[in-house]
Amino acid sequence: MSEGLERLGERLRKARTEAGLSQSQLGAPHFTRAYISALELGKIRPAMKSLEFLAARLGKSVAHFVDDEKQVRQRRERDLDINAAATLLARSTAGDALQKVNALLENATTPDEIARLRLMAGTAHNFLAHGRDALRELTIADKLLTQMNSADGSRAVRHQMAIALRNLGELDRARSLLLDLLHAAERSDTADRVFRMKLLRDLGVVSWELGEYEKASAYYESALEWAKDIGDVSGLIAIYNGLAYAHRALGDLEGATTYLQRALGASQIANDLAASALLHNALAVFAGERGHLESAYRHVDRAIELARVTGPESYVAHYLTTKAECALKSQHTDDAERFALEALETAERTQNGRAAAGARVVLADVAHRVGRIEAGVARLEEAAASYRSIGAKQELGEVLMRLSRLARDQGDADRAQAYADQAFKVTKATSALMGG
């Protein structure tokens, strides 16, 4: 306990007593009595934002509680650094945000600052599809925010936890958490329309991944009403994209393409180049499915061009895989193999396990196309290992069923049954038939 912290605590206690407030009253609604007590005893150092809140409650300046203006300036500079990292929490700059957050965590001392930075780290990991890393950071943040009795902070953390669980393939747990948050939001006296829109959007994502496409469409439509009402362009991009995939799954390719075009228009209005890249890639997939290969190439090349400029680099691997699939449909197996190998190298270098697995599946298709059956089986086994390592249960189940069919075609009934049994064990927990 430093002398400076002890003096700060004494001044805080004196100002609180003069104001006639208890420790609980001073801290409410953001801080617990225990946190205020620790401050007054000089055991912890408050973040500048926390000190500004407490000083305002007591009708004092921040300088009243600290030794000198230099300390005030240093804390303000640190808060500016944290806010600067927060502005990087977007899909294209998540890696940069994570680096800054990790550097700031090395010198973080107060519970509220640590909690905020852990939440930011978890959010960045979610953008990068690192579900396990995100869940680790968010669990720490949740414990701290619960101790601090921070309802808003805990709500934000649990929303990100749901996204992390979805990234890990724990779809039932993700949906349960999202529904709990939505019900709590509906019971709340203060209507946070943006938060409700995000919850409905994410419920649409999870429902789609569970194979419940009509339910997904309904969630997206509800989210769309909120997004239009509040004028959230970024929200519209994600919702239109989700509606496109829901309509595609329901067999409405024309409607799906229309929604993607709306999403692309919204991304151009928002000047969101990373989102534009994602949407061009989706349009390439849809065009390829409809046999419009020239259009598919045009869209995927645009996606790759944008991603190389805006990042994140790991997304380039997904787009190269799409281009490899287009080449395979065009009967250009050499090009397909070249694009898929480039996708695999990019995915491994950027630690994008999902993209690496997708590239291996395309390489398996190339191998089967040219008669290298055992090489194709080996690629599918590698893809299964990648999907298993990241908890992507739906994709893992699909690869295992492909391996089962290949084994059956080769006359190996026992091996075919073993793969089928594995696929059942992997996917039965997230089957659409068993979803509530």
Image (cartoon, rainbow, N blue to C red):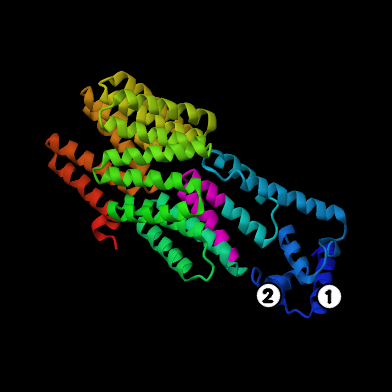
The x, y position of residue 88, in whole percent, is 60, 43
The x, y position of residue 30, in whole percent, is 64, 68
Instruction: Name the residue: 75% across, 70% down.
Output: 57
Q: CA distance from mark 2 to mark 1?
A: 16 Å
In the rendered view, would you say 385 is above or below 155?
above
**Horizontal arrangement in the rendering, residue 225 relative to residue 214 (left or right):** right
Mark earlier in primary sequence (2, 1): 1
**Horizontal arrangement in the rendering, residue 149 relative to residue 321 (left or right):** right
Report which residue position mark 1 lands on: 14
| Identity of the residue furthest to the right in this view | 68
Residue 46 is inside the magenta segment: no
Question: Contact (CB < 8 A) between labels 2 and 1?
Answer: no
Graded by Cα atoms within 10 Å as few (under 14), some (14 to 19) or many (20 or more), the crowding at tag 1 reads few
Amino acid type for the residue under numbered disc 2: Arg
**The quadrant where residue 366 appears:** top left
Instruction: Name the residue: 67% across, 49% down.
Output: 82
Residue 134 is inside the magenta segment: yes
Q: In the rendered image, is residue 160 in sight? A: yes
Graded by Cα atoms within 10 Å as few (under 14), some (14 to 19) or many (20 or more), the crowding at tag 2 reads some
Start and end of the magenta stretch?
121-145
In the rendered view, would you say 372 is above or below 80?
above
Amino acid type for the residue under numbered disc 1: Lys
At mark 2, the secondary structure is helix
Instruction: Name the residue: 34% across, 26% down.
Output: 295
At mark 1, the secondary structure is helix
Q: In the rendered image, is residue 396 in sight? A: no
Q: Which quarter of the image is occupied by the N terminus?
A: bottom right
Report which residue position mark 2 lands on: 33
The x, y position of residue 362, in whole percent, is 31, 31
Q: Which quarter of the image is occupied by the C terminus?
A: bottom left
